[in-house]
Amino acid sequence: MIASSSSLVLSMANYVRCHCLIQMLMQGVLQRLAEAKGAMQRNVIADKGEAIGKAITILSGLDDCLNKYIDRAMAGNLDGS
């Protein structure tokens, strides 16, 4: 019983860590988009492009980690397919 309880705790801890990491990455995307918006308002095109590029890089990394074999319907919804 102790082994299965500790396995459950470890599994839950891994889930929480993954969830927190995804949340942090999405916060980074939102921050970069806010930076891009500010650059657009200031008419600083280079900064806008750099911020959008960083947001796309983060989103691309998240997309690469998406397991399309576990839940194809959800992955398709997230992937836009």
Image (cartoon, rainbow, N blue to C red):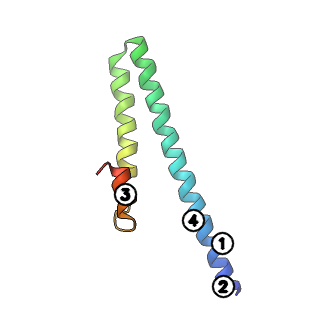
**Label 2: few (<14), some (14–19) or many (≥20) C-alpha neighbours in 10 Å:** few
Task: Name the secondary structure under disc 3.
Answer: helix
- Which residue is under mark 2? 3
Q: Is residue 44 left or right of residue 23?
A: left
**The disc labelled 3 sits on which kind of residue?**
Ala
In terms of sequence position, does the residue under pointer 3 or pointer 2 come before the other?
2
**Residue pictured at 32% horizontal, 48% vertical:** 80
**Label 1: few (<14), some (14–19) or many (≥20) C-alpha neighbours in 10 Å:** few
Indicate whether 36 appears above or below 54: above
- Which residue is under mark 1? 9
What number is the disc on residue 29?
Answer: none
Indicate whether 14 appears above or below 30: below
**Snapshot quadrant of residue 65:** bottom left
**The disc labelled 2 sits on which kind of residue?**
Ala
- Disc 1 and disc 3 in contact, CB within 8 angstroms: no
In terms of sequence position, does the residue under pointer 1 or pointer 3 come before the other?
1
Foreground label between 3 and 2: 3
**The disc labelled 4 sits on which kind of residue?**
Asn
Separation of disc 2 and disc 4 at Cα?
A: 16 Å
Q: Position of residue 64 (x, y in %)?
A: 34, 55
In terms of sequence position, does the residue under pointer 2 or pointer 1 come before the other?
2
- Which residue is under mark 4? 14
**Label 4: few (<14), some (14–19) or many (≥20) C-alpha neighbours in 10 Å:** few
